[in-house]
């Protein structure tokens, strides 16, 4: 029984050290501020580091050729299909109004 206790204490110590180093070395953590994760790791003996590894570590970067889960935002207005549709609609409306005006002017000139 003592050996099991020593083994579990060693596992807990290793998890504690790994979680603390991981939390302090990454650029961003998930689901809570870094200070909260450090306090959880320090104050909750075994469940704190496990919680950090399951819910606090940042997700790994997507692999090349992997599934893209969200649509990237357009980099410029030319890449945004909705914007191009709205511009096309506004431009078409202005063109129709201008054409109607030209036809009206042409008809007025022909009558004179």
Image: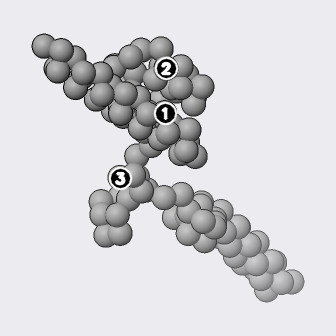
State the CA–CA distance, disc 1 to disc 3: 30 Å
State the CA–CA distance, disc 2 to disc 1: 8 Å
Choose the circle earlier in sequence order: 1 or 3. 1
The crowd level at tag 1 (other Cα within 10 Å; few <14, some 14-19, many 20+) is: some
- Judging from the image, what secondary structure is the residue with disc 3 in? loop
Numbered mark located on residue 36 in the image: none
Image-based side of 64 in relation to 58, left or right: left
Q: Residue at x 24, y 21 (%)?
A: 6
Residue 59 seen in this snapshot: yes
CB under 8 Å between discs 2 and 1: yes
Q: Quadrant of the C terminus?
A: bottom right
CB under 8 Å between discs 2 and 3: no
Choose the circle earlier in sequence order: 2 or 3. 2
On the image, the x and y values in percent for residue 110 come to 79, 86
Of 106 and 4, nearer the camera is: 4
The crowd level at tag 2 (other Cα within 10 Å; few <14, some 14-19, many 20+) is: some
On the image, the x and y values in percent for residue 59 come to 40, 46
- Judging from the image, what secondary structure is the residue with disc 1 in? helix
On the image, the x and y values in percent for residue 106 come to 77, 82
On the image, the x and y values in percent for residue 15 come to 35, 32
The crowd level at tag 3 (other Cα within 10 Å; few <14, some 14-19, many 20+) is: few
Numbered mark located on residue 20 in the image: 1
Question: From the viewer's perspective, is the residue at label 1 or at label 3 nearer?
Answer: 1
Residue 82 seen in this snapshot: no
Of 17 and 83, nearer the camera is: 17
Image-based side of 29 in relation to 5, left or right: right
Identify the residue at the far front of this view.
Answer: 2
Numbered mark located on residue 42 in the image: 2
Of 26 and 74, nearer the camera is: 26
Q: Hey, which quadrant is residue 11 in on the image?
A: top left
Location of mark 3 (residue):
69
- Judging from the image, what secondary structure is the residue with disc 2 in? helix
């Amino acid at each position: 029984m003592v050996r099991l206790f020593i083994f579990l204490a060693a596992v807990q110590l290793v998890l504690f050290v790994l979680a603390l180093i991981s939390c302090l070395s990454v650029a961003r953590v998930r689901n809570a501020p870094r200070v909260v994760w450090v306090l959880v790791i320090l104050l909750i003996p075994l469940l704190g580091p496990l919680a950090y590894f399951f819910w606090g570590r940042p997700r790994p970067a997507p692999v090349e050729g992997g599934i893209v889960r969200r649509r990237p935002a357009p980099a410029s207005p030319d890449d945004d299909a909705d914007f191009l549709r709205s511009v096309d609609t506004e431009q078409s409306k202005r063109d129709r109004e201008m054409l109607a005006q030209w036809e009206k002017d042409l008809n007025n000139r022909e009558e004179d």
